[in-house]
Amino acid sequence: MAELEVITLFLFSVIVYSIPLLYGTAGEIMIEKSGSLNLGVEGTMAIGAVTGYVVACRTNSLFVGVLVAFLAAAVVGAAFAFFTVTLQANQNVTGLTITTFGVAFYFFLGNGLSNSAGGWPMLGDTTLAAQFAGIEIPLLSKIPVIGKVLFSHNILVYLAVVIAVLMWLYFAKTVPGLKLRSIGENPGAADSLGINVTLYKYIHIMLGSGIMGIGGLYMGLNMGGTFEGSNCWINGYGWIAIALVIFANWSPARAIVGTVVFGLFNSLRVYNVAFATTFPGALGWLNKIPAHFFSALPFIITLIVLILSSMRKNSSSGEPAAIGRNYYREDR
């Protein structure tokens, strides 16, 4: 029974760790489908996290916190769109600037509140913990192992999956989605057909950024809302999300599977000792591996994914043909 419990908790943890990556990956896929490459995922998630968390604590409302996280990150997306779409600035430089600014804003606001009279808002002083608690889906949550692993999570877990599925349907089955994909492939051709390229880019960059912001808030709440003053809640997840876009071949549906794979490697950081203790014969060797290796493992896997994807050149790639290139209407 102890063995089954460890396995169940591990698989449950895999889902928990994969969800913020799913938000970040899905948001970046939407942006890249418009032909833009945003390397500011880390900073965008950080801004969504800290603003959404503070407002959620002040209002005692998870809904308001999610809304603010989305809107704050969407504003960051609007800034990215303004510089790269309207002013035709370099997308890579703009994205890196957003990451630098976003993480700095996270620490600026966090340290400022921590040193103020009211102090940093604590999750335990609000009703957010109850609102963020797991929701057991009737009947399904009672299924042994699977019920706990898949059907007893908080509302933001289910929301992430719904967003990814709806995004996949949007790209594949709707006219606006097909227009967006055409912009990512050939904005000149889309423009010649009467599609407002600038408007489409603005809307979808803002939507994608807003989705990232919700993922940042999820990370903050999952960590108990504790502001350490030295470590950012996002902790490199934004960079992993960018790699996962490639791993998922620019498909929101595949992103669900891809983020679970990365969540599995991340969960080993927490459960390696439990596995070694519970299964000493088969997994006792896990105790001999330094703990720092498990912390670095998701980033090692990210590096491997990037190397392998750079070597893969085939017609089945979902990468938009015009990604990362600014569109000059006069050159059409």
Image (cartoon, rainbow, N blue to C red):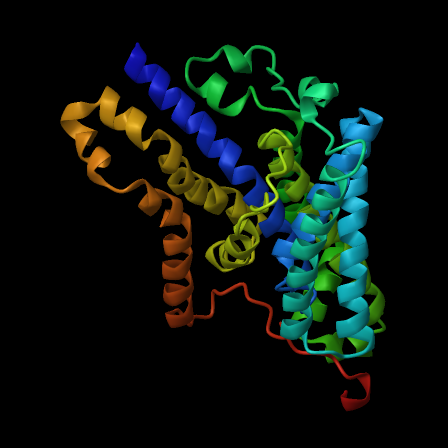
Q: Position of residue 274 (x, y in %)?
A: 31, 24
**Front one among 96 and 167:** 96
**Front one among 47 and 202:** 47
Q: Position of residue 101 (x, y in %)?
A: 70, 61
- Asked whether residue 306 is in view, the answer is yes
Is residue 323 toward the left or the right of residue 50 in the image? left
Residue at the bottom extreme of this rendering: 331
Is residue 91 toward the left or the right of residue 77 in the image? left
Tell me which residue sits at (37%, 37%) in the image: 269
Tell me which residue sits at (39%, 44%) in the image: 295
Is residue 203 toward the left or the right of residue 265 in the image? right
Residue at the left extreme of this rendering: 281
Look at the image and tell me in which quarter the N terminus lies.
top left
Within the image, what quadrant is residue 82 found in?
A: bottom right
The answer to whether residue 284 is above or below residue 28 is above
Tell me which residue sits at (42%, 43%) in the image: 261
Tell me which residue sits at (68%, 17%) in the image: 130
**Front one among 233 and 4:** 233
Look at the image and tell me in which quarter the C terminus lies.
bottom right
- Asked whether residue 170 is in view, the answer is no
